[in-house]
Amino acid sequence: MTERRRPPDQMPSTESPAPPAAPVEKLPTPLLDVLDQDAVWRDTAQAATARARQKLSTLDESLARGKTQVRLDARRAGVRVPDHLAQAHALALNLSWRFADTAMVLNDRGVAATLTFGGRPFRCVLPWSSVWGIVVFGSDTVKVWPPDLPPELGGPPRPPSEALPPLVEPGRPCLTVVESPAEERSESLCEPEAQPPAESPAAKPRPPWLKLVR
């Protein structure tokens, strides 16, 4: 699916964006009471792909109208947020095309956006698997995808280690310096020790052939 970036008909606002909302510790009880437990516990790869498309469509439409808040489990694989928020299971982040220098990207793998935390910009990366709720612009309710809820909010337990999702945006290439082993390096860089030249037999004095007899 084509990546979404800042719409050309919307200019960035000169106003400073409001800081992201504080982490939300829990959802309202009525919302948890109506969760479909079958959907929570019976999940498939095809269903996860369908949910990712729903999240992309929901967030894209809401952002076209105004600032939108996403709820996510920051502990999920592939998430990149500031260290002091990395263990939040119900982190709330505000997104908007009008935030200055946000450079937001939406695609079928997730969301990437530069947000400000304590006056410092940070490039956040949110795979769809980590996003369990979206507060649609103009709404006071959270649209929730139950199978992606953290265990603390009624979701299924997560394995100790889970496979990393596809990259939301490609990483920068890095260069690696490969050195040869020390033995090979010493042989190739060090000059062999100078050996004393062998003494030539021609250099030795010859005994006399004639002797004086008296």
Image: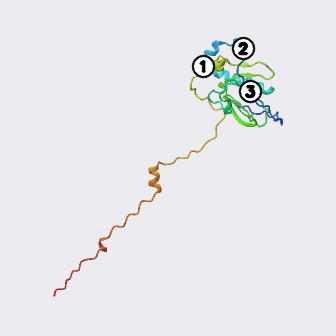
The reply to whether dot 2 and dot 3 touch (C-beta < 8 Å) is: no
Q: Amino acid at mark 2?
A: Thr
Secondary structure under the numbered disc 3 in the rendered image:
loop
102 to 144, vertically: above or below: below
Residue where numbered disc 2 is placed: 29
Closer-to-camera residue (162/85): 85
Q: Position of residue 160 (x, y in %)?
A: 56, 24
Secondary structure under the numbered disc 1 in the rendered image:
loop
Residue in the image at 68% along x and 33% along y: 82
Image mark count:
3
Q: As drawn, which residue projects farthest toward the left? A: 214
Closer-to-camera residue (60/68): 68
Secondary structure under the numbered disc 2 in the rendered image:
helix
Residue where numbered disc 3 is placed: 22
* Side of 7 where 53 appears, left or right: left
Q: Amino acid at mark 3?
A: Ala
Q: Amino acid at mark 1?
A: Pro
Nearer to us of marks 1 and 2 is: 2
Give the quarter of the figure containing the C terminus: bottom left
Mark 2 vs mark 3, CA separation in Å: 19 Å
Residue in the image at 69% along x and 25% along y: 72
Q: Position of residue 151 (x, y in %)?
A: 63, 19
**Label whose residue precedes the other's in the sequence (1 or 3):** 3
Closer-to-camera residue (26/41): 26
